[in-house]
Amino acid sequence: MATYEIIVTDVTCYGSLYCVAGWDRISNRMIRPEPQGANSRDEASRFWNAAYAGPGKTFSVGNVVRFDATNPLPDFLFPHATEDRIVDMGTPMHVLETLNPAAMVQAVAAGTAASLPLAFDNALVRVNSKAYVPTGNKGRSLGAIEIPPSDIIFFEHQWQNENPKLRARVTSAGRVYDLSVPAEAARTRWRSAGLAAVKADVKASTRVHIRAGLSRPMQSRPNECYSQLNGVILL
């Protein structure tokens, strides 16, 4: 058991559930807290519901949250197991303070990499602008980069009869990466105001702090954890 004080940086949504992560200011590394009872056989068990995560909740971007947690179970797969921790729900979680976007970005600066590949320890495999880290790689599954507004383009993608989804093309170290966008705040803005508003927000900023993460492997692609956009902080 260890105590963590994470600055919540990543809140991503999957239906009605949330995955959260943040920079632990005790150990100076990214941590992904998961609910007690989380297990590798039930993906939903590893997510938080709306009572704990999302705007105004304990795990809201910018909140500094203290909690006790244990290491992941032995069957948790890397690279996610690098940051996975299981929260002890028998001890209370405390929100110590809330940082504004600029203060948050400054506080997590030590975890910001010079490029997307470096954010994942140069383990990214890029194929036709999409990129993944192989399942089992014992490196990071969470990171961050900063780019100028011109290096990110949001767009909508529709596959067959599915509803349109928000995606982003991010240029890093001279290469373009096509990323899914599970970031809760960006998706909420897109759904409420539309793609043009999301693009206008980016254009009005001076720099963009990108929270980067990896998806868990899909059944159809069990050996690949694809890079995704976990958060966008406009400065």
Image: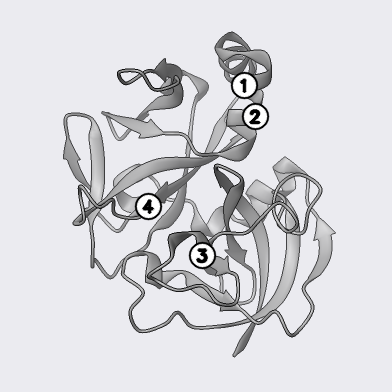
Helix or strand or loop: what does disc 4 sit on?
Answer: helix
Instruction: Please say if 88 is above or below 127.
Output: below
Looking at numbered disc 4 in the image, what kind of residue is underneath it?
Ala
Helix or strand or loop: what does disc 3 sit on?
Answer: helix
Q: Residues within 10 Å of mark 1 (few under 14, many from 20)?
A: few
**In terms of image quadrants, where is residue 15?**
top right
Looking at numbered disc 3 in the image, what kind of residue is underneath it?
Arg
**In terms of image quadrants, where is residue 137?**
bottom left
The quadrant of the image that shows the N terminus is bottom right
Residue 119's tag is 4
Q: Which residue is at a point 64% across and 69% down the rendered structure image? A: 25
Separation of disc 1 and disc 2 at Cα? Answer: 5 Å
Marks 3 and 4: in contact by CB < 8 Å? no
Q: Residues within 10 Å of mark 4 (few under 14, many from 20)?
A: many
Marks 2 and 1: in contact by CB < 8 Å? yes
Residue 44 spot, x, y in % from top left: 50, 59
Q: Is residue 21 left or right of residue 175?
A: right
Residue 115 visible in rendering:
no
Q: Nearer the viewer, residue 139 or 25?
A: 139
> Which residue corresponds to mark 1?
191
Looking at numbered disc 2 in the image, what kind of residue is underneath it?
Thr
